[in-house]
Image (cartoon, rainbow, N blue to C red):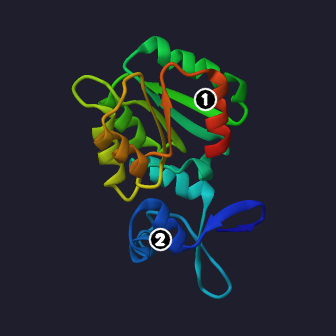
Amino acid sequence: MTEQFGERAFSTFQAARLCGVFHTTVINWVNKGKLKARLTPGGHRRIPLSALVPFMKEHEMPIPSDIEDERRHLLVLDDEPMLARLIESGVAGRKDRCAVRVADNPVEALVLIGQRVPDLLIMDLMMPVMDGFQVCRILKSSPATRDMRIVAMSGRKLPAAQQDFLDKNVDEFLAKPFTMTALNATLDRLL
C-alpha cells in the first residue's frame, strides 16, 4: 500500500490479495475500465482506496476491516440471545475501538462473515443444527477466513478429542459462566 496526496493506494498485487484474485485479473479490470487506477511515472498501476472499496462492494467481495474501518470488528455467535446481548454490552466500552455484530445461528454468522470477515469471532460451541466445531471447520478450510481469530465458549465439559480440536483451531476457550473481566482480558490479548 502506498499513500499519495493523502489517500491510500494499492498496487495490483495488494489489490489482488484483498480481492482474492490473481494480480493479472486486477490489471485486466483496470485495462477494461472496470476499476479505476492511476499510473505512476514508472508505469505501475495504483488503485486508490476510494475506487477499490466501492468496486469490492459492487461485486459483493468481503472487505477487510483494516481498509474501510479502523475499528476492530467482532462477531458474536450464540443461540442464546440473552448471552449474546450480554457479551455485546460488555464490549460496549470499546465502541470507539470495536464494532460488534451479533448472530443467533451459524448460517447467519457465516453470511455475515462472507460480507465482512471479522477480526475476532466469539462463538458458542453447542448449538442446534450446526455446532461451533462445524463452523470452525468451515472457517479454517477457507483461505479467506483461515487466519481469523476465534474465541470458543461452552458450559459443558468437553471430551478429550473436542478439546484437542480446540487447542489446534481456536485462539482461546472460555468456560461458561465467565466474567466480563475475563472476556475483556481475552480481547486485550487477541486484539
Report helix, strand or loop for mark 2: helix
Q: Nearer the viewer, mark 2 or mark 1?
A: 1
Residue 50, percent from left and from top: 61, 54
Residue highlighted by disc 2: 30
Question: Marks 2 and 1, how far apart in space?
Answer: 45 Å
Residue sitting farthest toward the front: 160
The quarter holding residue 112 reads top left
Q: Is residue 154 above or below residue 98?
A: above
Q: Callout 2 environment at 10 Å: few (<14), some (14 to 19), or many (20+)? A: some
The quarter holding residue 128 reads top left
Residue 87, percent from left and from top: 56, 21
Q: Nearer the viewer, residue 21 or 137?
A: 137
Q: Nearer the viewer, residue 163 or 145?
A: 163
Q: Nearer the viewer, residue 155 or 135?
A: 155
The residue at the point 31 percent across, 54 percent down is 141
**Residue 46 left/right relative to 170:** right
Quarter of the rendering occupied by the N terminus: bottom right
Residue 189, percent from left and from top: 65, 44
Q: Is residue 99 above or below residue 84?
A: below
Residue sitting farthest toward the bottom: 42
Amino acid type, mark 2: Val
Q: Kindly tell me whether residue 69 is visible in this rendering.
A: no
Residue highlighted by disc 1: 183
**Residue 135 left/right relative to 120:** left
Q: Is residue 180 above or below residue 125?
A: above
Residue 54, percent from left and from top: 51, 50
In the rendered structure, find residue 113 and report the number of the disc placed on it.
none
The residue at the point 38 percent across, 59 percent down is 143
Residue sitting farthest toward the left: 129
The residue at the point 54 percent across, 58 percent down is 52
Quarter of the rendering occupied by the C terminus: top right
**Residue 162 left/right relative to 103:** left
